[in-house]
Image: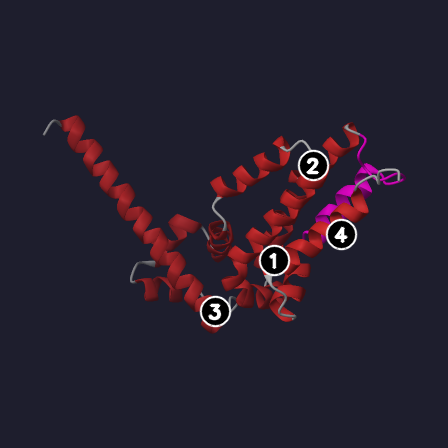
Amino acid sequence: MSQLKKRKYNSEGRQAQAALTRQRILEVSRTLFKSGGFECTTIEKIAKHAKISSPTVYTMFLSKRGILRALLDEALPSAHFENLLKEVYSEKYPKKRLQISAKIARQLYDAEREQMEFLQGASVIAPEFREIENERERRRYDRQAKTIKLMVEEKSLAPGLSESKARDILWALTGRDIYRMLVCEQSWTSDEYEGWVSQLLIQDLIRKSPL
């Protein structure tokens, strides 16, 4: 085997091993967060249960906050999420765009639902989760800007509704808290949640056609 091929082989082997280690850390962390709570789970405890060194965990994730961010990002793969956004932006009709926006919220929160129990507790007492949640909400608000901008450009936005207020409505109605209250606490189905959010978005944001 040539030196070049050997180096490539070794590099690929290390990458594969690192990926397996990373996944093991995430699986152990998810289990410990659920059983013992986010705030009571330490990096040292995660490392012990994953049978690796604490420095390895710090090298891969920097902090417990980094692990939590990775768990949240893992819920809905970024490639799938980006495809959903492209579907929104390429859609010709505003009603359909808003329906897809509701679908995105539903799929994201469905994917996070297994983690919802420990995340909800963490949001109250753990500043790490609150900071990550704020980052994600700002990103979600920014990503939704284009949907409303398209409505402004095509003059499909409801009369008297400013662009900023429309963005606020879209952001609020597709927020995690509404999903949590209706689906997780009141036992709505995900289909019922998605349909209701779609209906409200269309009702509140789209200019009504004259009779």
Residue 174 at what x, y percent from top left? 68, 51
Query: Contact, CB < 8 Å: mark 3 with mark 4?
Result: no
Q: Which residue is mark 3?
A: 34
Q: Earlier in the sequence, mark 3 or mark 1?
A: 3
For the residues labelled 2 and 4, the Cα–Cα distance comes to 16 Å
Q: Earlier in the sequence, mark 2 or mark 4?
A: 2
For the residues labelled 3 and 1, the Cα–Cα distance comes to 26 Å
Q: Which residue is mark 1?
A: 191
Q: Earlier in the sequence, mark 1 or mark 4?
A: 1
Q: Earlier in the sequence, mark 3 or mark 2?
A: 3
Q: Which residue is mark 4?
A: 200
Q: Which residue is mark 2?
A: 147
Q: Secondary structure at mark 4?
A: helix
Q: Earlier in the sequence, mark 2 or mark 1?
A: 2
In which image quadrant can residue 182 be found? bottom right
Residue located 59% across and 68% down the image: 121
Q: Amino acid at mark 4?
A: Leu
- Report the quarter where the C terminus lies: top right
From which residue to which does the magenta span run? 155-176
184 is within the stretch colored magenta: no
Q: Residue furthest bottom?
A: 36
